[in-house]
Amino acid sequence: MSWIYKTAAEQAAALAAGEVTSVELTQAHLDQIAKVDEQVHAFLYVDTEGALAQAAESDSRRAAGRPLHELDGVPVAVKDVLTTTGLPTTCGSKMLEGWIPPYDATVVARLKDAGLPILGKTNMDEFAMGSSTENSAYGPTRNPWDLDRIPGGSGGGSAAAVAAYEAPLALGTDTGGSIRQPGHVTGTVGVKPTYGSVSRYGLVALANSLDQVGPVTRTVLDSALLQELIGGHDPKDSTSVQAPVRGLVEAARAGASGDLIGVRVGVITELGRQGDEESGWSEGVMGVFDDAVEQLRKLGAEVVEVSCPSFVHAMAAYYLILPAECSSNLAKFDAMRYGLRVTPEGNPSAEDVMKATRDAGFGDEVKRRIIIGTYALSSGYYDAYYGQAQKIRTLIIEDFTKAFEQVDVLVSPTAPTTAFRIGEKADDPLAMYLNDLATIPANLAGVPGISVPAGTAADDGLPVGVQFLAPVLEDARLYRVGAALEAAVGDVLGRDKLDHRLGLTEENK
Amino acid sequence: MPELSRGLSRDQVRHLADLARIDLSDAELDHLAPQLNVILESVASIQGVAGDDVVPTSHPIPMTNVFRDDVVVPGLTAEQALSGAPAVEEQRFSVPRILGDEQ
């Protein structure tokens, strides 16, 4: 069996045992990219030469008995919103086509310092605005489980790359669910760490008070290994928290082998069947969710229902706060210092150039959000929109505080439906926004969240994830409960089915 | 308090796009203006949800300003900083004239 089907932890162990080299591992993943990425389109850029050179260096370190880290030599993919010296960073936008940043994001520097070869940059909704990766200026990524369907977003590329065995590990970013919702629809694990616990330096900001970098993997343990590697205080990020988040790997191992006796789990009333009808919770998703909750009970968890009444306003608050922050953040794309410059005819002023460039360089969703944000922040409307949204943020934080007085973790379906068809919601922004309904509250409150594959929907056979949420800095709880559920449900997705859908046979595997 | 669900006119959208320095075409205005109104109508549901007694939150975790030690550390070189510029002249960013016609 090819090395690509092993988990990152298994690949690391095989490297340590001398059973495989990093060059072999890296080449195997590059071969898989060559086989399937024409269909999946998870990558915007593949750095074959660079990855193999980094792998060769890793092998030399191992041979000399000096690996830099447990994951030294295990390849990784990076979402194209994180800056990488020498590799293009486009954020899925024409605005940054061909831009090669002169510095590494701190998380990228940490991957390099630990010796992980970087396979390439993954596709995403433009500037991370979207839930389907259809907003990429470079064409959509396809869901490996059904190529006619979306892989989620904004980090559809990272999730699809990991789901299709093109990479064992990937980095994503999560502003309103962009790691967790793609995890849900592609049958992969995705974690949004506690706000501030992973550096945002070199992450092209969408909304500073919501953005967080996190791991995208196929197993809970692999996410723990990657989050421990990228996390920790960074003096280059003023919002970086001093308190370290530790014990994640330990928690994942404990969860996989133990029970959940004594763990209190709260099912969130508002996120599921009893929530708003318009939210469209599908029977396929709810069926898997009910089974997962039953599994948690069987493992010994004490399951209770918890109400978070302000969560029903989370989406509206989010779609004011996010546009407000992004309209300000994206002002830096002014055609003067880097990125696209479009010069209209005649003798245009800098302002004319700026306007023409931003019209040509930004896609529809980016324009919609910048205009909404500009409106929400304008004088006369500020209190009614942005001020009110910030107050709702307070109420949501209070809901979490009260809930965590009663339970250790909260649980909900990660998103209301399984993967929908490409094009189905492309021109209906509100329908698209509903995908983030269950994931948004965590970003507004800064709490950590994980999505773990829990099965396939009875109606369409597509992957379904379950989301756990924990208090700020208690990320370890997610790993314990997530690993326990993962072990209990077993390999429900089935690799053979995936190979079949990707047209891989015994001969060409 | 202004009426929030009244919606934006085409001219208002054009004005907002102007403030945001985006040169929207007529076709784009036709396409985007109705969508913006659907979004605004939906988010207007938060009106009146939180009373005057609720304090606003800007960041999920309490933040204090951070200063680094006053020590010289290497930054980007001029070449690096200019490496992505659309136009460069004499080791500087080269930009179009900054004054408009009416200035």
Image (cartoon, grey):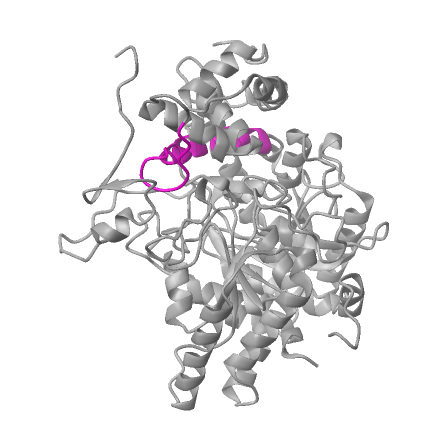
> Relative to A465, does residue A349 appear above or below in the rendering?
above
Residue placed furthest toward the front: A346
The quadrant of the image that shows the N terminus of chain A is: bottom right
> Relative to B61, does residue A35 appear above or below in the rendering?
below
Q: Say which quarter of the image contains residue B85.
A: top left
Residue A393, position as x, y percentages in the image: 49, 33
For residue A65: magenta?
A: no
Residue placed furthest toward the right: A459
Residue sitting nearer the eye, A451 or B100: B100
Residue sitting nearer the eye, A224 or A396: A224
> Relative to B62, does residue A464 appear above or below in the rendering?
below
> Relative to A275, does residue A226 appear above or below in the rendering?
below
Residue B13, position as x, y percentages in the image: 52, 16
Q: Say which quarter of the image contains residue A163.
A: bottom right
Where does the magenta region start and end?
A: A315-343
- Magenta portion: prevailing SS class: helix
Residue A263, position as x, y percentages in the image: 61, 60
The residue depicted at 43 percent of the width and 31 percent of the height is: A357
For residue A335: magenta?
A: yes
* Whether residue A210 is visible: yes
The residue depicted at 40 percent of the width and 72 percent of the height is: A114
The residue depicted at 34 percent of the width and 58 percent of the height is: A233
Residue B76, position as x, y percentages in the image: 24, 53
Residue sitting nearer the eye, B74 or A309: B74
The residue depicted at 50 percent of the width and 56 percent of the height is: A214
* Whether residue A388 is visible: no
Q: Position of A328 compared to B37: left or right?
A: left
